[in-house]
Amino acid sequence: MKIRIVYLLLGILVLCLLACLIDERWMLPCLFHRLTGWDCPLCGGQRMLVALLHADFRAAFALNPFLMCSLPLYLLWVVCYIKPKFLQQSAVISRLCSDSAILIYIFIALLWGIIRNL
């Protein structure tokens, strides 16, 4: 189990280092945006991550505020996936990592996708 965590952390570190070197020309285009012309809930996410890696929090928030505010929740979900015993620490954590919380988050993400295109 500890080896998997080390490999995961090394993978994240390598991705972070590569993201610092990525130019916008090398980023993947959004297929939804290309087909419809609308921004999806994740549009701007790659550029937001690169801005975060450069510690430019204002630019990261401007690129995708919803995704920026969701990062702590994503980190909690990763921790709960890697270490399931973490769920037993508190009732709040177990509720935030429940299936119903994830479904509510997906619904909110869809609403954000609609609102940002109005």
Image (cartoon, rainbow, N blue to C red):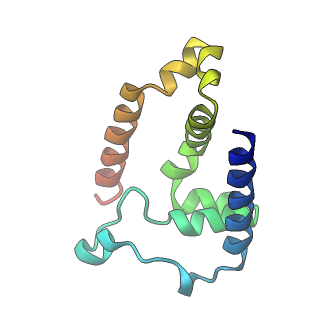
Q: Quadrant of residue 72?
A: top right
Which of 94/32 is in front? 94
**Residue 10's spot in the image, x, y percent?**
74, 58
Which residue is located at x 65 percent, y 79 percent?
22
Judge left or right: residue 109 versus residue 28: left
Which residue is located at x 27 percent, y 74 percent?
37
**Quadrant, the N terminus:** top right
Judge left or right: residue 41 versus residue 53: left
**Residue 43's spot in the image, x, y percent?**
43, 64
**Quadrant, the C terminus:** bottom left
Q: Quadrant of residue 63?
A: bottom right
Q: How many marks?
A: 0
Task: Work out whether 95 lies above or below 113.
Answer: above
Which of 91/117 is in front? 91
**Residue 24's spot in the image, x, y percent?**
57, 82
Judge left or right: residue 109 versus residue 12: left
Task: Work out whether 4 lies above or below 28.
Answer: above
Query: From this viewpoint, which residue is outermost toward the bottom?
Result: 25
**Residue 2's spot in the image, x, y percent?**
74, 40
Task: Work out whether 21 lies above or below 3.
Answer: below
Query: From this viewpoint, which residue is outermost toward the left?
Result: 36
Judge left or right: residue 94 versus residue 2: left
Which of 105/60 is in front? 105
